């Protein structure tokens, strides 16, 4: 492995799989943007395709809430594309609604909303895959998006999602006033519960998910959400 070869990999000129490198060589030279796993150079995180990059806009947060732009969220003055949902993503979202719906409506706790619904989350907007809003918060103009965050925000991780963005979004919900965030990860079949910046818990498929004090009385086996 020569220095020229390392440079070509870092610049995207040479495919990483064409490079033969030992662990000792990687530790000595390093390759920016890559990790060494089982004898291979693996990108630390895939670059986003152009269609998934944020678009600067002159639109204000208030204008976005009034008119909305389908397929986008508003973050720091930019329109951020939402990853196109896969079949698996859609199935999991429907499972969540299926198990939550009956309990929420029988107990008259509030309403559930799908990913088409916009919520103001601090100085940005978000469209969680599933959201719960308690009865006490169901105020305002129904023809526009919510000017408040949901009580419970539920996000299903897509293949194109970047992990750091998921965590950042979960914490943004909490900072804006969301009481509970669930992040469902289809590969590991886990649910990560965000209660605060310092209270984060991950449940596996053998655990039971509860609504805690946000959706009182709700319980569901994690495995059922991924069936």
Image: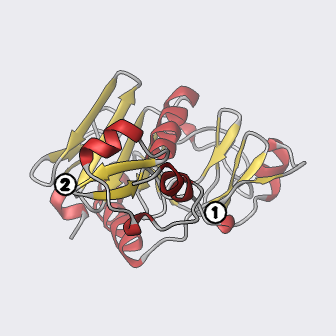
Q: How is the image coloured?
A: secondary structure
Viewed as shown, does residue 183 lie left or right of 209?
right
Residue 176 location, quadrant? top right
In the picture, the quarter occupied by the N terminus is bottom left
Q: CA distance from mark 2 to mark 1?
A: 30 Å
In the picture, the quarter occupied by the C terminus is bottom left
Give the mark count.
2
The residue that disc 2 covers is: 222
Q: Nearer the viewer, residue 34 or 19?
A: 19
Q: Residue furthest top?
A: 198
What x and y, as percent, mark residue 72? 68, 60
Q: Residue furthest left?
A: 206
Q: Is residue 221 placed above or below 139 in the rendered structure?
A: below
Question: Residue shown at 66%/32% (left/top)?
Answer: 122
Q: Nearer the viewer, residue 140 or 36?
A: 36
Q: Is residue 145 placed above or below 210 in the rendered structure?
A: below
Question: Residue shown at 54%/71% (left/top)?
Answer: 84
Q: Residue furthest bottom?
A: 87
Mark 1 Cα shell of 10 Å, populated few (<14), some (14-19), many (≥20): some
Question: Residue shown at 85%/51% (left/top)?
Answer: 57
What x and y, as percent, mark residue 174? 49, 30
Q: Which mark is residue 190?
A: none
Mark 2 Cα shell of 10 Å, populated few (<14), some (14-19), many (≥20): many
Give the structural element (helix, strand or loop) at label 2.
helix
Which of pointers 2 and 1 indicates the residue nearer the eye? 1
The residue that disc 1 covers is: 52
What x and y, as percent, mark residue 142? 69, 55
Q: Nearer the viewer, residue 81 or 20?
A: 20
Question: Residue shown at 36%/29% (left/top)?
Answer: 195
* Label 2 vs 1, first from the N-terminus: 1
Q: Residue furthest front?
A: 2
């Amino acid at each position: 492995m020569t220095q020229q070869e390392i440079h070509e990999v870092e610049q995207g000129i040479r495919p990483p799989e064409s490079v033969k490198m030992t662990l000792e060589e990687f530790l000595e030279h390093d390759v920016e943007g890559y990790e060494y796993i089982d004898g291979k150079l693996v990108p630390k995180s895939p670059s986003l395709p152009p269609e998934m990059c944020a678009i600067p806009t002159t639109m204000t947060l208030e204008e976005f809430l009034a008119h909305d732009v389908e397929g986008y969220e508003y973050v720091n003055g930019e329109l951020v594309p939402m990853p196109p949902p896969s079949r698996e993503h859609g199935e999991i979202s429907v499972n969540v609604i299926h198990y939550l719906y009956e309990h929420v409506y029988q107990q008259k706790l509030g309403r559930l909303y799908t990913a088409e619904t916009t919520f103001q989350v601090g100085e940005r907007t978000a469209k969680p895959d599933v959201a719960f809003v308690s009865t006490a918060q169901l105020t305002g103009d129904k023809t526009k998006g919510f000017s408040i965050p949901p009580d419970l925000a539920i996000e299903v991780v897509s293949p194109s999602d970047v992990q750091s963005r998921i965590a950042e979004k979960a914490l943004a919900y909490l900072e804006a006033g969301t009481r509970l965030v669930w992040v469902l990860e289809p590969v590991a079949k886990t649910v990560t519960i965000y209660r605060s910046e310092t209270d984060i818990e991950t449940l596996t498929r053998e655990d039971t998910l509860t609504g805690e004090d946000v959706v009182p009385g709700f319980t569901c086996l994690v495995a059922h959400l991924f069936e």
